[in-house]
Image (cartoon, grey):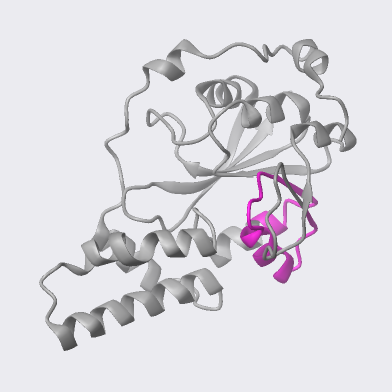
Amino acid sequence: MTEYPRDEIRRRGGDPEEISDRYRDQKPASVSVSWADFVETVCNEDDTIEYIAAIQEALTRLRRRKRECDIGMPISAQWETDVQQRLIAKYAFAIPTREALEYLRDQGPLIELGAWKGYWASELDNCGADITAYDIDPILDPWFPVESGDQDVLLEYSETETLVLCWPPVGPMAYEALLLHDGDVVYIGERPGEGYKAFADMRFFDVLTARYEHVAQIDLPSHPGATDDLHHYRPLD
């Protein structure tokens, strides 16, 4: 990897050392997906996507177990305690849909930073997308080949690639990636402007608001308590 490009970040108007005061002051958002909305949405999605199929199977299994064992705990509580975290750990935080995958494919070539297990990259590759995935600490046995790399790899690419950030980690990575990338950005996560985020920092959302045009949004199924969507941003002229 190259030496971390702090001078380049400063040249592009960023401050690598700054922590946004607005980020410190954010409070948790009150908007979230209900259990009923989650079940209805997921049951109507394309089960050829493995994550969707796994969720549908888990819901069926929980309902059967409740009928057979007459468990007093609501299915929603069983989901949160028994299933949800295992699914996230196996697949990803955000749940892809066919519409989202095909839309992303058409924005290629794609560069994904913070790809984690590479599940989204795998589904994109399956539908014909041109994607390269990076993570600062690639895991063993990912869904898709994930190369070792941080935001500095963006200096090797041009504005023709679309940057993909799916639930970027808390901290400066996503913000600095915007400063180092000159092309379109697809952000997958909770809606900007709804308050404190469990990922990135407020500087990231500040830069998206100030320097980009919001050109598209695709609703995604969200685990209860989240409000994930796909957002496509294009740099302002």
* Residue at position x 58%, y 26% in the image: 204
Where residue 181 sits, quadrant-wise, is top right
* Residue at position x 89%, y 36% in the image: 156
Q: Is residue 189 above or below residue 211?
A: below
| Relative horizontal placement of residue 137, taking residue 63 as reference (left or right) | right
Q: Is residue 174 above or below residue 69?
A: above
> Magenta stretch?
104-132
Q: Position of residue 96 (x, y in %)?
A: 54, 61
Q: Position of residue 23 (x, y in %)?
A: 45, 19
Instruction: Please state, as top left, top right, bottom left or bottom right, where the N terminus lies in the image.
Output: top right
* Residue at position x 37%, y 56% in the image: 223
| Relative horizontal placement of residue 107, taking residue 43 as reference (left or right) | right
Q: Is residue 177 magenta?
A: no
Whether residue 212 is visible, yes or no, is: yes
Nearer to us in this view, 148 or 224: 148
Instruction: Please state, as top left, top right, bottom left or bottom right, where the C terminus lies in the image.
Output: top right
